[in-house]
Amino acid sequence: MDRQTLHEHIRSTYGVPADYPWEDTNAVYRHKDNKKWFALIMDIPKSKLGIADDEIISVVNLKCDPLLSGSLLGDEGIHPAYHMNKAHWITLRLDSSVPDDKVLWLLDISHSLTEKKNKPKNK
């Protein structure tokens, strides 16, 4: 999956536009109600992921349950989070190394983990 396809999917599925808080190409996607991030798409050098190459690639950071992320980190194209809490976030390369259905599944998980939780009312 490429950056533009993921952007269009997020916009059509979750109804949120990209936010550009740093006035560059790094796109943050937030919930409308609680403003929590569920995805961050950015361009970084491959070397930031431990790959011996300075080519710039697009990646997405997604929130992930630590138990799940531990098993995913062995998969091609999935890395410990770049520039975020590595226990709760993962980075996926957007270079077709991660199957599209897995990207979308992990995006759904990230969206769910960051959505507003309804607290029970006190009686």
Image: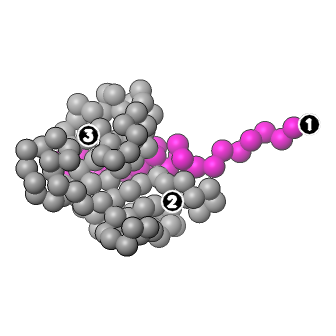
Viewer-nearest residue: 55 or 107: 55
Q: Is residue 90 left or right of residue 2?
A: right
Residue at 12% over, 43% down = 51
Residue 114 part of the magenta-drawn span: yes
Which callout, 1 or 2, points at the residue further toward the start of the chain? 2
Label pair 3/1, CB-CB below 8 angstroms? no
- Label 2: few (<14), some (14–19) or many (≥20) C-alpha neighbours in 10 Å: many
Amino acid on which disc 2 is placed:
Arg
Q: Residue 53 in the image: x percent, y percent?
A: 7, 50
Q: Is residue 23 left or right of residue 118?
A: left
Label pair 1/2, CB-CB below 8 angstroms? no
Using the numbered discs, state the Cα–Cα distance from disc 3 to disc 1 in whole angstroms: 45 Å
Q: Residue 86 in the image: x percent, y percent?
A: 36, 37
According to the picture, the residue beneath numbered tag 2 turns out to be 30
According to the picture, the residue beneath numbered tag 3 turns out to be 79
* Nearest-to-viewer mark from 3 and 1: 3
- Label 3: few (<14), some (14–19) or many (≥20) C-alpha neighbours in 10 Å: many
Quadrant assignment for the N terminus: bottom left
Q: How is the image coloured?
A: one colour
User: Residues in magenta?
Assistant: 96-123
Residue 105 visible to the viewer: no
Q: Residue 49 in the image: x percent, y percent?
A: 20, 44
According to the picture, the residue beneath numbered tag 1 turns out to be 123
Residue 24 sits in quarter: bottom left
Amino acid on which disc 1 is placed:
Lys
Residue 120 lies, with reference to residue 115, above or below; the image says above
Residue at 54% over, 54% down = 36
